[in-house]
Image: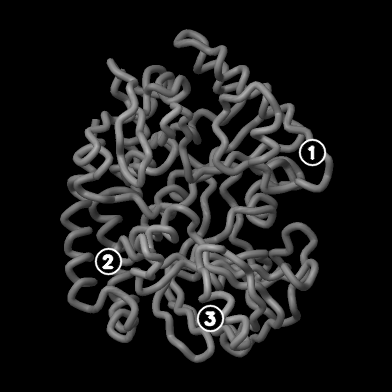
Amino acid sequence: MVCAACGGGGGADDSGDAGIDAPAGPGSSEVFDTTVVRRFELTMTPEAWNTLEADPRAETYVPADLRYGDFALGNIAVRYKGGIGSLATCFDQSGNRTCPKLSMKLKFDEYVQGQRFAGLKRLNFHHMNRDPSMMKDRLGYGLFRAAGVPAPRAAHARLIINGMDLGVYALIEEIDGEFVEDHFRDLDGSGEGNLYKEVWPVYNVAQPYLNALETNEDQNPSVDRMVRFAAAMQAANASTFRAVLGQWTDVPTVVSYLAVDRLIDSWDGIVGWYCNQQGACINHNYFWYEQVGSDRMWLIPWDLDNTMMVPSPIRTAYNMPDWNASPSDCTLRMVFLGFYGRPPACDRIIGLMAQVLWADYQARTTELLAGPASAAALEAEIVQMEALLMPEVMTDTKGPGITAWRQGVADLRADIPVLRARVTP
């Protein structure tokens, strides 16, 4: 299956929302070339570096200059990233840093309006501290894209700041206005619709959707479609859900999303529900794109840190039922960091997806297991990355080290049959 919104990945003319690329700069297809580990060198003043290091959890931008091969771009912005997830967990209760490297975000138009690099407004460098194989980001996003789901591109890159080699990162495409224009302009004529981050269609008022907007924030945006989408989803029942979902989404793409999400066992994605003590629950790490001129919503995956873990802590440590299990008890249970969890199917939409789309999900899973998620296809990906990363790991002093990396790759190879078997119909 091919998703009409899953194009993108253009070359040097990736201009997105009328941004300005410097002359002779690279194209995004080069930047995300998976056969090469690109070098990104940042230079910043001691004052900027000290500000960055003083409180990484503040996620404050500081100015820097970028060199990429022979190409230079000045006056960009840099900050650490990760919020309560991958950033907060890199510090102990006394505030001491415990991770060898932190994820970073580069923003090219913070100080120079419209400035772009390779047609991009932002770039993400993910630390992969939870993944000693250093391969899961690429595998996961690659599977989503191969399944026809609009998803970020991912590659590997090396990051150097003021001559300090910070090692190998997963280079992840940002989901922003540039991303949706690149991926959806052929579908709706512009790719300039609303983009929402981490807001599930359960609210009957506008403010939660306005708060979640990632595009069009300064253009007096209307979120009426999202409010109506939520109302339709909440009013649907088992006999009407497929038709309602089909009115608002491309059902095969939603099913493909579920098939990949469950194959990689993402326990901090759309089926992972985390709650406060008052019972307010949310899920994480996804976006909705609202197609221009049409009641059509597209689900986009994000942040694959907590995937492909065998055994999955959400089930083994927290005794959480799988996404399709009809819950007999929706009582909150303590999970981690003071948060509570709720069984996935206690959410009305997830429950109806599991009930109504189960046959579609199984059929799509079977297709993926015979195609891009076959044992042979995944092994070929691992072999390619293994050869690519070996020399990088050997010189990455902030990475897992060659012994731990080799063990991580061996563990990943051993885990893939388990992941495949768990979803095999």
Residue with the mark numbered 3: 40
Residue visible at 51% across and 76% down in the picture? 53
CA distance separating discs 1 and 2: 43 Å
Q: How many marks?
A: 3
Q: Picture quarter containing residue 249?
A: top right
User: Mark number for residue 221?
Assistant: 1
Return the residue nearer the eye: 340 or 345. 340
Which of pointers 3 and 2 lies earlier in the amino acid sequence? 3
Report the front residue among 4 and 79.
79
Tell me what residue is drawn at x 49 percent, y 10 percent.
237
Vertical order, 348 against 300 (above or below): above
* Horizontal and vertical percent position of residue 246: 56, 22
* Kind of residue indicated by mark 1: Pro
The image position of residue 220, as x and y in percent, is 83, 40
- Residue hosting label 2: 132
Q: Which mark is residue 276?
A: none
Q: Is residue 173 above or below residue 371?
A: below
In the image, is 312 to the left or to the right of 116?
A: left
- 10 Å crowding of disc 3: few (<14), some (14-19), many (20+): some
Q: Quadrant of residue 396?
A: bottom left
